Image (spheres, rainbow, N blue to C red):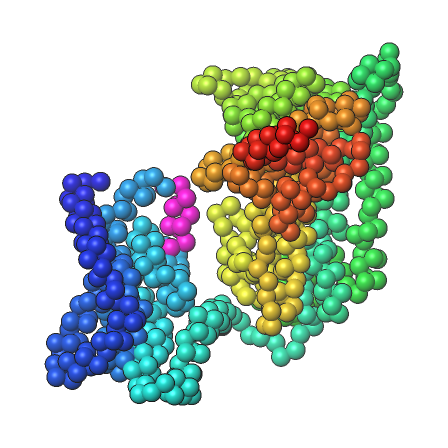
Amino acid sequence: MKAKQVVTLIALAVLIVLFFVFDLNRLLTFEYMESQRHAISTFQQQHPLITAGAFFALYVVVTGLSLPGAAVLTLTAGAVFGLLAGVLLVSFASSLGATVAFSLARYLFRDTVRARFARPLAAIDRGVKKDGAFYLFALRLVPAFPFFAINLAMSVTPLSTWTFYWVSQVGMLAGTVVYVNAGAQLGQLTSLSGILSPTLIFSFVLLGLFPLLAKKGLDSAKSRAALRRFKKPKHFDMNLVVIGAGSGGLVAALIAATVKAKVTLIERHRMGGDCLNTGCVPSKALLRSAKMLSYMGRAKEFGFKRASVEFEFADVMERVQRVIKTIEPNDSVERYTGLGVECVLGDATIVSPYKVRVNGREITTRNIILATGGVPFVPPIPGLAEVGYYTSDTAWELRALPRRLVVLGGGPIGCELAQAFSRLGASVTMVERNPHVLMREDLDAVELMQAQFAAEGIRILTDHSALRVETQGQDRRLVCEHAGDEVVVPFDAVLVAVGRKPTTDGLGLEQLGVALSERGTVEVDEYLRTSIPTIYACGDVIAPYQFTHTASHEAWYASVNALFGPFKRFKADYSVIPWTTFTDPEVARVGLNEQEAERQGIPVEVTRYHLEDLDRALADEEGRGFVKVLTPPGKDRILGVTIVGHHAGELLTEFILAMKWRLGLNKIMSTIHVYPTLTEANKYAASTWRKNNAPQGVLRWVGKFHSLWR
């Protein structure tokens, strides 16, 4: 901060301190203004211009310095100047004062704030550059948002001063009219009986309802603007069209059919989507086979001299397909048709907010849900396409086990498949550009998993960036960069698992004007509604959580809001989102972990219980891992849980339930758990927290009591 800025800041701080030191804020209270109303009104009648000028200047100073009292001054304006003059004075004074506050904050803090928070502000800047005036207008229209906070927040954005002024002038006008009118009605009271007058009651009802009415009106205006260029049909073929029959689309269609809506479900490839055909189901089937095989290598741990098993890799992969076929009827066309859903196989194109084209047929519908999921992202590594590669979509085509497998990516998918193929006999090398695998997890969980992988013979190359793929005859090599040097990794096959990207191509979204993020995800509001109000979206196509269970969770909100939005809408609830990486041991999470708490500046108390102390884990030879619970210091409210261990995903459910329904660790500790089970680990973690927070002073007095009682 420059010297002039420091001087300005000190001067402003002195003025604000003096304002409170001399108790000047009492002059801006409703009680004081009401006591002086007669005197002010008398002076105003004698000197109207001087009174108006003084009031205008006072209002600008109060709002410019973000002092309390603007609301009281607005009511006073109505009481003293009447509705029309009061609105004129307050409207221009408030806009000018807000602009002064905006300009001062920009001069004093903008450079410092932007230098410190450049990365998070980048996303905000993009939104402000695109729709900054609209955002400000929406905030100004709803008085529930503190105006002084809006002034300060907008000062660090790229919004121009002129835009800030005129949008504030227009946006605050409706609220100003309501408040000044309420003040004008108060100013007309001559007795207590006047409080019950219909006009005054209406003014205060309007004052209370205005934020809600303003928000509804703004939403309605925005919706009409988005749909203005499209012709709305007089009649609709369907209440709802769902595009994509993965976990999100299936749930959305099922809910619509359950409430007797007419619904069409369109799928371009296979019913069940990624989860059934290429994701959750096949990967867990493969992991199960690989885990059974790993027990053979651990025979001595279970009291056997040796154990062996004969298998063909192709048979294992055929078992995976058999599992898919067994589950497939649950997601089939036949089942959903029987439930009342019209199922159509084909490529869907949204031609208007009310119309979807598929197989040459145009279907009119009141609302549309996008549940098109995502596909594996393949980075543009030179030479990779030429040698060929596998992804989590295509790995299930393998029938011959690669001798040397390179797994690009150390996220959950990469870790799960790397361990599975390693246990089945491949020599696996994981290449991860970040400092460690499973970047979203805490280091204690990561270190345990990396040690497990190393013990199983998986080579882990962290801080390695893939540069190119080279071929020399029959030999294939991945060239990576690490600490400025090139590292060569020979391979027979490459599995790319560096993330997923949303499926939006060919849907017609760009032509309609559906807003997409820089990552290509469909942008939605808190009701899962896109920028076109008749189109909703859920699942991987919107992120931020690319899990089957979150897609199903979001599908409920998308379908219910699409079908019943005009009457009641529900904000999507992301307060308790769990997930599990199904390695061995598993890594399960819900809520905060330590690195997130530190990054967000949230103080936490960390309680650990190690599974090496759990009877059932020892009996099962699964004493690896821990239960870690984060709580506010000294309180038993659960902020987050990380579990690493055998069946960690199953153990997590108790904590998910507790967090959802606000049950603390004391409730878990006082609940009977069957002995001997793995779930006792949850109770023992809660007991550990209780022990760490025991009232030591009380216990000392209790000890003395028992000594005397003997």
* Position of residue 525 measured from the top left corner of the image (x, y, whole percent): 52, 58
For the point 40% across and 41% down, the residue is 119
Q: Is residue 485 magenta?
A: no
Q: In this view, does 615 lie to the left or right of 568?
A: right
* Position of residue 694 measured from the top left corner of the image (x, y, whole percent): 58, 34
Q: In this view, does 446 lie above or below 6?
A: above
Q: In this view, does 365 lie above or below 304?
A: below
* Position of residue 354 measured from the top left corner of the image (x, y, whole percent): 61, 69
Q: Does the magenta stretch include residue 126?
A: yes
Residue 392 or residue 543, whichever sits in front: 543
Residue 143 or residue 23, whichever sits in front: 23
Magenta: main secondary structure: helix
Res 208 seen here: yes
For the point 67% across and 74% down, the residue is 236
Q: In this view, does 215 lie to the left or right of 417?
A: left
Region rendered in magenta: 118-128
* Position of residue 56 measured from the top left corner of the image (x, y, whole percent): 19, 71
For the point 69% across and 70% down, the residue is 238
